Image (cartoon, helix red, strand yellow):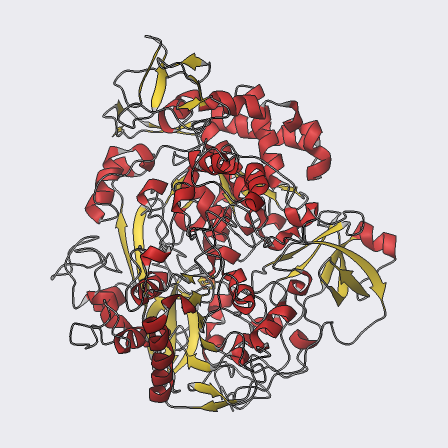
Amino acid sequence: MNSEPRVALSRPVADEVRKTTCYMCACRCGINVHLKDGKIRYIEGNRDHPVNRGVLCAKGSAGIMQHYAPARLRAPLKRVGPRGSGQFQEISWEEALSTATQWLGHVRHTDPKKLAFFTGRDQSQSLTGFWAQQFGTPNYAAHGGFCSVNMAAAGIMTLGGAFWEFGAPDWERTKLFVMFGVAEDHDSNPIKMGIGKLKQRGARFVSVNPVRTGYSAVADSWIGIRPGTDGLLILSVVHELLRARKIDVDYLARYSNASWLVIDAPGTAEHGLFARDGEGRVLVYETVTERPVPLGTKGARAALSGRFELGDGRFVVPSFQLLAEKYLDPKYAPEAVAEETGVSADVIRGLAAEIARVAFDEAIIVEQPWTDVHGERHPYFVGRPVSFHAMRGLSAHSNGFQTARALHMLQVLIGAVDCPGAFRFEPPYPKPMTAHPTPHGKAEHFGSDKPLSGPHLGFPRGPEDLLVDAEGKPTRIDKAFSWDAPIAAHGMMHMVIANAHAGDPYPIDVLFMYMANMAWNSSMNTAGTMKMLTDKDPETGEYRIPKIIYSDAYSSEMVAYADLVLPDTTYLERYDCISLLDRPISEPDAVQDSIRWPVLEPDRDVRAFQTVLLDLGARLKLPGFADNHGHPLYKDYADYIVRHERRPGIGPLAGFRGTNGDRAGRGAANPHQLERYIENGSFFSAHIPLEAQFMKHANQAYQDFAVRMGFFDTPQPVTFQLYLEPLQKFRLSADGLREPVAPETHRERILQAFDPLPQWYRPFGEAMVDRESYPYHAITQRPAAMYHSWGSMNAWLRQIHAKNPLYVPRPICDELGLVDGDWVWVTSSHGRIKVEIARMEAVNSRTMWTWNAIGKRAGTWALDANAPEATKGFLMNHLINELLPPRSDGMRWSNSDPITGQAAWYDLRVRIEKAEAGAVSEPHFPAIAQPEPEPHPVLLRYGQEWAS
Ligand code: SF4
């Protein structure tokens, strides 16, 4: 479809059109906001914007109803009734900020770890993380731990980048696209546009997902896999590729650690680690001279198989030898995994054959000479046009890290990473794990009135980097980076309230949260979480979590549980920056970032959270926020965006830097930078030179470009880590062979899960319950028209999803005599819910599911207490505990991936029984008093009286 020449599709409705960035989900599309008489009349997609090229989804156009929602908070609030009652009194900003400063200042002077500062799906983590670091608490993270850290951590540790914000399929060239477990609102417009391109070109699209909705519904082939078994399916495909010798040996030898020699010395502290010479250089085995040589030795042809003896008597094997031995095992044969995965052997074999055929028989060439980081000139780029994409469905399991690793291993084996037609990195990625920091939060990293000595989040290289004390006890409230979850690269937000309530590992004083609906859909064990937030210490009569500060733009369920509410603006009323330092929006061919700006001034007594955070930082006299005299360094967030430098010449925005605005990436602060962005449609885009566009991990031109742009100060090429040595270090600690030795209680779990080569094991939540008593899976999907609970109050989006049935597969319905509209009890090992059902064909026959976050607590979001969301809507969360069932010794692990701590939302097993018809889903909680919302309109009409 040719988009030129452009035609006016609608008559002008506005006095003025302001271009900014959508925030109705996390895709960050460009939008044109049409204003008339000072009101929004219309939102359309910005056709010049590189993310969406004018495409707008239902959510994006409904931003108008988000902006005028009656659920908007109007002023700072102080709790005056019991926690959870929703009884508040409006207060001034001065009172709110003084109170917060007093609470936070006391903590900082006495014991900074008693502040837990956690944020939800905000996009200002570069600022919030910096603020928490300057405050000095070890307890900071955003929502990644309960979202998709398995994808991010596995991707970065294996490839130096992961799906979505770190890379994308080569939509223009791919011939086979295989997608695993992707919600239909994920990367929404870019994926829809990409799939459109595939369909136009006749490329094949395979979706692996237990539920056939959204993207899966338009796939050429749908594989309705059993939840939690994706890793087994992938390893079976790997088995078939190895058997057929359909792997790219040259690519493996050049770009992965397949040739690196692994020490074979069982029972020693070196077993399974890479062999290194006296200078610490990894060794490979040179096949011509038949001797071990340091990696990178000019002209060396490294062996990928064999077993060799080093001069000192130690035996070594190339890591690929271990890989091949492992996956050629018949236990990965398609017939052997068919029952567990619910996918027939023929389908698995067919998928493997199709991947091999397209990768090798339909290879493509891009005629562009390039030079690799070893100085070798190549006449062209070779493309293996098979691309993959995966997200939460694959990763939100307790085996999700290893599953995501398995998928990345598959990509590398066929040579399909950042070549034409494959998954391609988006700047500033790839970035090797070694270029990321280690986590900070050990006792020696913080103290009263001091900043933390480094960033909170990072990648431990081994057990020595864990954030534990001398006894092995966690130093963070969420227990991230402890033996519980050693590589919890995004923290474990889903454990904060439970641990703070239990005082384990210690009690806290202030819980400070932003945009995180933890009293409802963002928590497991929702009823238990609400109780934890309201529980009091019987001796002191004080709340167990003494002070809660919460910031949100809307009267979500969490607001009612705060003591102090800091009302945020809507996304159309504030400055934001979508930064390369944070969650980038680049494309494989271009470096990009963008801003939001106040296209409307707030008409309520609200302030942008980021500006409030800067104000609090200055009041607390935090370094980086106040000068030596205690004066604020920044007027507001806009000022910070322009003037803050993380490193000399590197600020939040890469575009229009330098005093003239003509520098990209590195450059002095430009006082007119935001004006330049606004003139440019609120985004900046710089194309990557042609020679640098592929093979970025090993492309000298790209590495030079990355240094020029300021992503790194020196080149950071990536060698793909198929064999992951840090995991082996943990296993050696668990075996008692390496210091620090793992505590006894953790050893078995680490030995089971920390295989340095990708593996599959049955998810814990499934393995620890009686499968006969709980014979079915229960999962959630996010609909295309809602982003978690963000559309809850949106008058237009509510017309699409105001309640959510439980979708039950036809065979189960037939067995239980269920028809559409019947009610059932759904029971897990943790709890039960009573809900209405709908029969469904296009779903794995052992899996029931519902839409996420549609059910609402009565009395919230300025909805009528009898709104369908509060009566027929429901949450699956009530069935999921944040802890696994007790072991034989009473010990309970968190319901998380044992490596990264990712919340295992989709490990849930249930049974169902027919119930009496009901009027209200159960559990049903008493209505919360609204925190003095704007008057509820009976009818909310587009373009007329918005809130009357
Ligand atoms: S996909 Fe839709 S909601 Fe998300 S940013 Fe783009 S237009 Fe907005």
Residue 72 in percent (x, y) is at 48, 81
Quadrant assignment, res 820: bottom right
Give the side of residue 948 with respect to residue 838, left or right. left
Side of 291 where 871 appears, left or right:
right
Rendering coords of residue 467 (x, y %): 41, 52
Q: How many numbered tags mark residues here?
A: 0
Regarding residue 471, the answer to whether it shows in the image is: yes
Vertically, is 611 above or below 233?
below
In-front residue for pair 21/238 = 238
Closer to the camera in the image, 370 or 568: 568
Between residue 703 and residue 359, name the one nearer to us: 703
Residue nearest the viewer, comparing 193 with 323: 323
Q: Is residue 324 left or right of residue 159?
A: right
- In percent of width and height, residue 86 lies at 56, 85
Q: Position of residue 453 (x, y in %)?
A: 29, 57
- The residue under the point 56% across, 25% down is 326
Image quadrant in which you'd find residue 669: bottom left
In the rendered view, tell whether residue 566 sits above or below residue 30.
Answer: below
Residue at left offset 25%, top offset 64%: 677
